[in-house]
Amino acid sequence: QVQLVESGGGLVQAGDSLRLSCVASGRTSFAMGWLRQAPGKEREFVAEIRWSGGSTYYKDSVKGRFTISRDNAKNTVDLQMNSLKPEDTGVYYCAAAATGGTGYNYWGQGAQVTVSS
């Protein structure tokens, strides 16, 4: 019953910024996250935010550059990506965890982010 709709992504140069947005319809989930998958790589965790309390968690390599935020009333989660590096290239997925203590249950369609040097 939870559907995730992503927007954003694109082709940028190193050092540029992008903002990804995800709107979750249906019931509110326990947490929302962003994960990415680079070509030939496994999907990896990028950032997560809890709906209640707003605690955030980040992959070490994006700390200080990426910021995840949410609007509880709109069930919207954004990922502000600054100082992008070629290593950030990949397909970014919005995900939702229905409850605590479980993995992500719902996924967006993915958004391509390409960072050129």
Image (tube, rainbow, N blue to C red):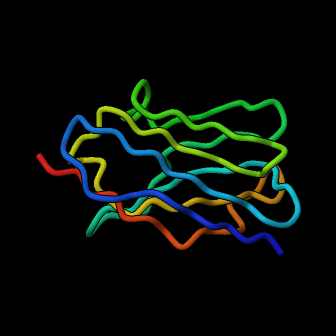
Q: Position of residue 31 (x, y in %)?
A: 74, 48
Say which quadrant the N terminus sits in.
bottom right
Quadrant assignment, res 84:
top left
Residue 104 lies left or right of residue 87; in this view the side is right
Residue 41 lies left or right of residue 26; in this view the side is left
Q: Position of residue 112 (x, y in %)?
A: 37, 64
Q: Position of residue 64 (x, y in %)?
A: 42, 24
Q: Residue at x 24, y 41 (%)?
A: 85
Q: Residue at x 59, y 69 (%)?
A: 108
Specify the farthest residue to the right. 27
Quadrant assignment, res 3:
bottom right
Determine whether 31 is above or below 63 in the image: below
Quadrant assignment, res 41:
bottom left
Say which quadrant the C terminus sits in.
top left
Specify the farthest residue to the left. 117
Q: How many marks?
A: 0
Q: Residue at x 43, y 62 (%)?
A: 43
Q: Position of residue 53 (x, y in %)?
A: 81, 30
> Quick one: 83 or 103, which is closer to the camera?
83
Specify the farthest residue to the top. 64
> Quick one: 36 or 28, which is closer to the camera?
28
Q: Residue at x 59, y 34 (%)?
A: 57
Determine whether 98 is above or below 76 in the image: below
> Quick one: 48 or 77, which is closer to the camera?
77
Determine whether 22 is above or below 48 in the image: below
> Quick one: 1 or 103, which is closer to the camera?
1
